[in-house]
Image (spheres, helix red, strand yellow):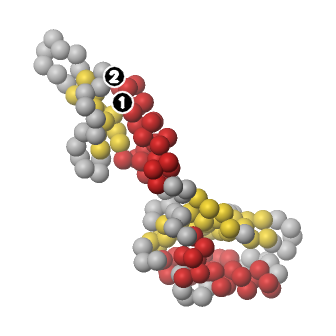
């Protein structure tokens, strides 16, 4: 794991994005202060505080996000989340990539629409008849995002 990770802990750490080992250090500094039993503390240290990302990488098994449930001594639960890169899901990333754009036509011809690919800077579609058609194209792309890339989320306890 050499890329950036985004880490957070419900109610204890807002999402922070940093290089992998630095992000795990930040996460470990937060998690180790939580009131938990010694067995769970050992497991959390092994996962987040070992100065290595190998255990976490093994548990993530290629997924973009992993949630680890931490049981506190008072019986409540918090979720420690680790996500690759910017922390966006595949669907959110696809949705952010496209934007409907109106294309003005010569006088007397109706305006048409295309979907602009913000990554390439080029249209991703042919001419579309309306803005709603462009939004529908994006909606279908977002809906199919996880089918093309496989599961994007895994929960470990």
C-alpha distance separating marks 1 and 2: 7 Å
Q: What SS does tag 1 mark?
A: helix
In this rendering, is residue 151 above or below 113? below
Residue shown at 19% from the left, 25% from the top: 104
Q: What SS does tag 2 mark?
A: loop
Quick check: can you spot residue 91?
A: no
The outermost residue toward the top is: 108
The outermost residue toward the left is: 106
Residue shown at 60% from the left, 65% from the top: 66
Residue shown at 28% from the left, 40% from the top: 124
Residue 107 horizontal side relative to residue 5, left or right: left
Name the mark on residue 130.
Answer: 2
104 and 141: which one is in front? Answer: 141
Quick check: can you spot residue 59?
A: yes
Residue 141: horizontal and vertical position, in percent? 42, 40
148 and 13: which one is in front? Answer: 148
Residue 60: horizontal and vertical position, in percent? 57, 70
Name the mark on residue 134.
Answer: 1
Badge 1 vs badge 2, beta-carbon distance below 8 Å: yes
């Amino acid at each position: 794991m050499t890329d950036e990770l985004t880490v957070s802990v419900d109610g204890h750490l807002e999402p922070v994005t940093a290089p992998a080992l630095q992000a795990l250090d930040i996460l470990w500094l937060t998690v180790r202060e939580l009131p938990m039993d010694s067995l769970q503390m050992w497991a959390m240290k092994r996962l987040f505080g070992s100065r290595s990302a190998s255990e976490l990488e093994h548990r993530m098994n290629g997924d973009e996000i992993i949630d680890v449930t931490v049981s506190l001594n008072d019986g409540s639960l918090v979720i420690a989340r680790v996500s690759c890169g910017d922390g966006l899901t595949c669907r959110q990333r696809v949705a952010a990539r496209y934007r409907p754009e109106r294309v003005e036509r010569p006088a007397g011809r109706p305006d048409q629409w295309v979907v602009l690919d913000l990554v390439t800077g080029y249209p991703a579609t042919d001419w579309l008849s309306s803005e709603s058609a462009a939004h529908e194209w994006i909606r279908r792309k977002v809906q199919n995002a996880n089918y093309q890339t496989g599961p994007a989320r895994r929960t470990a306890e």
